[in-house]
Image (spheres, rainbow, N blue to C red):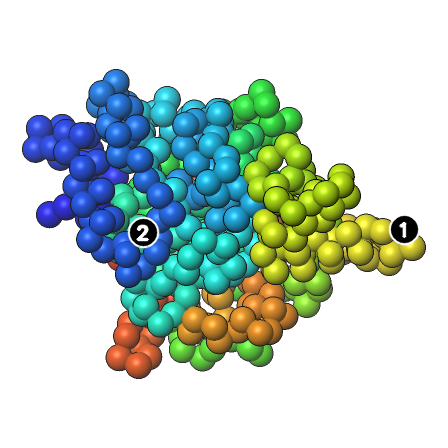
Amino acid sequence: MNAADFTITQLKQAYQSGDLTPADALKSIAEAIDSKDGDIGGYLSYDLDLALADAEEVDLSLPLGGVPIAIKDLINAEGQPCGCASKMLTGKYKAPYDATVVRKLRRAGAIPFGRTNMDEFAMGSSNENSGIKICRNPYDPERIPGGSSGGSAAVVASNTAVAALGTDTGGSIRQPASHCGVVGLKPTYGRVSRYGLVAFASSLDQAGPMTKTVEDAALLLGAISGSCERDSTCLDLEVPDYTAALDKGVAGLKVGLPKEYFAEGLDPEVKALVEAGIKQLTDQGAEVVEVSLPNTEHAVATYYVIATAEASANLARFDGVRYGHRSNSADDLLSVYEKSRDEGLGSEVKRRIILGTYVLSSGYYDAYYLRAQKVRTLIRDDFNHAFKEVDVIASPVSPTPAFKIAEKLSDPLSMYLADIYTISANLAGICGVSVPCGAITEDGKDLPVGLQLLGKPLGEETILQAASTISDRA
Ligand code: GLN
């Protein structure tokens, strides 16, 4: 068995029994990447020598002692490339520092190993917007792995990584986790520091674990959570032992099913699998009630105003002067900006910058941005209201299983609309997890489907507790 086949827990056991050293594990993961990832495209790069040097100093008694973690290409890890799968930065920027999540991982003994593919600057739901190369779904190479953390999901699913970090601004951890049959958790906004994440939409972004089991997600979440003096939105609160929540069962837990999420547009086979997953909860004593999130119909529009507005500001720093690509054919200051951005950024990123600039511009600000902020409050109120009655909310993650590569490429709107079940959690700042609940067979291939469990702010223990009941890989 290759070390990349292991879960975090299994790898730690192999270290404890002396069957394996972190250096052995890293070498065999590199072999797995070399032999398997060429067909998948989950990694953009890895640096074995750097990781082996890290492994020399590692303390195996730590919670993640010697565990290699693959890192999404927008999270800074000192000495490693951080290209955001963009031509703007790839090959032109090496991280001079560790993001807080990477620093905390190292402190827990983990080794950041490998940079995972993604939609450029995390904008997308399919990985087709990667500016570097395509990433395929390990269950069916004709299909997308999801996005934007598609590489992180694909490397965990294809056993070329033990576990990975992703980021989620509107579903980018949960949706690819669902499409690739892995566990993906978006923490409550503020639970995990954003310092050192290349910002997409600062009021929505969170980093989180993508793992083979719920137990691994709990371990990884515990390691990356907690205060950070460099991110004022990061909560200075004690981090619980998330693994302690896993054996508690769900007897008496109240599960809300939002009626707006089980309506038109949901693939009947996805619905059946999600309902079967929910039945596992009720079989073990959970109680199900219907809840309503009446502003769901406005969520996609609200998100695509707020996220693009924030992106247009955040991406202004990529101007050909301070970071990344600078055009060779520019002959004055304005054309440095224009040509560098034109050459360095892909079409979806440009579309978002243009949309975001438009909704912030004078004359349109009130009609779009300000209104979207008000609707955001209504969406948050919907959840507050629902969580007065229930402990968790269960729903699909995505209306369909993974779609075919290029199927939606010419229709960005249909891609945006498929984010309907995930983006409200980011707008409300609550936590959510995708846990595998079965697979649909299409063209002779099994396509995984995830069940989403949403929790109250800082309700990570409760959603993990429920997820561990459902997951058959835990
Ligand atoms: N699919 C959404 C988008 O394209 C979410 C992306 C994300 O969470 N980073 O914006």
- Percent x, y of residue 244: 34, 35
193 vs 436, nearest the viewer: 193
Q: Reply above or below: 21 against 324.
A: above
Q: In 3D space, how far apart are the residues under numbered discs 2 and 1 (Cα atoms)?
A: 44 Å
Q: State the residue position of label 2.
A: 155
Does the numbered disc 2 mark a residue whose Cβ is under 8 Å from ligand 1?
Answer: no
Judged from the image, the secondary structure of the residue bearing numbered disc 1 is loop
Residue 134: image quadrant is bottom left
Judged from the image, the secondary structure of the residue bearing numbered disc 2 is helix
Residue drawn at x 64%, y 32% is: 322
Q: State the residue position of label 1.
A: 362
Left or right position of 459 against 201: left
- Percent x, y of residue 114: 34, 40
93 vs 447, nearest the viewer: 93
Q: Reply above or below: 19 against 124.
A: above
What is the three-letter code of the residue carrying label 2?
Answer: Val
Q: Is residue 22 visible?
A: yes
Left or right position of 335 against 190: right
